[in-house]
Image (cartoon, grey):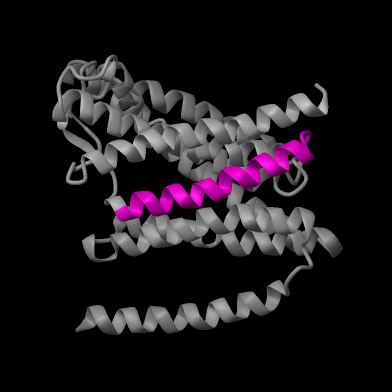
Amino acid sequence: MNQPTVRRIAWSLVGLYLILVTIGLGFRFLLPNAPIGFELPATVSLSLALTVSSLIGAMLASRLPRNPIGWIIGILSIFWGLELFSEGYSYYGLVAYPGSLPGAESILFWRTSQASRFAITGITLLFLWFPDGRPVSLSWRKVAWISVFAAFLYVPLATLKPGPIELLPFLDNPIGIDERFWAVLEPIMTIAGILQALCLGAAGISLLLRLRRASGDERQQLKWFVYAATFFPFAFVFQVYGGPEILMFGVALQVLSLTAMPIAVAIAIFKYRLYDIDIIIKRTLLYGSLTAVLALLYFAN
């Protein structure tokens, strides 16, 4: 494939993302009080963060098409665009103004499938393949394949879950199966989800192993990415296991991580000596510890 074609494909992903997000945000502004997804300010913040991610992914993919890192970053942004579009379109066409939009029930498929699970696999691959597009050793390829298999197992099963749809609890799944059959399939879906989580953790370990073994230029590259990726698991924990008080703090960390990771990738690949990453890490630890202490004192009161 020649360079102009690669460049067009890479930047077309940005165009697709912007179309999906623009339409999705349009529905959110038309329905500001709709109980879907995150609050509007958080949704806008995540969309802006992933716009940066999409642009950097296209830049990397167009310049280094053989390295999968840029393509992974660009495609990860598409998942958020699809999520935002499907939520807004489905709610508008099925709840707010029933029958006003064609195919609203079909679009709901994306929401019911919880296809954001593909994004988890994408981040797993990003951790495994950064910075040179290859795992730290051949044996780590198994982690990638298991994560891909788990995603393709989880998503179809999730479409069959009966009852209210996650993040759209006012709608019942139109293709949900009987509770008796679901009782058999649910444990399989749960196992697939656990496999994905384990693969993501293993990919994080492989990143740390690569950092420990690396030297010279590669070590500088990895420091940038590991620094940015550190925020992501904390964001996940705060959002899933935290109470309402710290949910938005988790969203803020997620925005920070989703913005910092692609920027760190770009710096690592193109200009890794732009800043002294060791100084930044030390300051982050200092300010992060201070923030944690203040937060504990606040919630203790």
Residue under the image location 73 percent in, 75 percent down: 276
Q: Quadrant of the image for the N terminus?
A: top right
Q: Where is residue 225 in the image (x, y as percent from the top left)?
A: 65, 58
Residue 42 seen in the figure: yes
95 over 39 or under it: above or below: above
Q: What stretch is highlighted in magenta?
A: 41-67
Please tell me in which quadrant of the rendered image residue 267 appears.
bottom right
Residue under the image location 17 percent in, 46 percent down: 33
Along the viewing direction, whichever of 83 and 113 lies nearer the viewer:
83
Lateral position of residue 241 relative to residue 193, left or right: left
Lateral position of residue 128 relative to residue 138, left or right: left
Q: Main secondary structure of the magenta part?
A: helix
Lateral position of residue 80 relative to residue 14, left or right: left
What count of labels does the image hold?
0
Residue under the image location 62 percent in, 35 percent down: 144
Q: Quadrant of the image for the C terminus?
A: bottom left
Please tell me in which quadrant of the rendered image residue 171 appears.
top left
Q: Where is residue 251 in the image (x, y as percent from the top left)?
A: 37, 57
Along the viewing direction, whichever of 171 and 2 lies nearer the viewer:
2
Q: Position of residue 114 (x, y in %)?
A: 36, 32
113 over 288 or under it: above or below: above
Residue under the image location 73 percent in, 31 percent down: 7
Lateral position of residue 157 relative to residue 34, left or right: right
Q: Where is residue 76 in the image (x, y as percent from the top left)?
A: 53, 38
Is residue 176 in the magenta section? no
Is residue 50 in the magenta section? yes
Residue 116 seen in the figure: no
73 over 94 or under it: above or below: below
Along the viewing direction, whichever of 233 and 221 lies nearer the viewer:
221
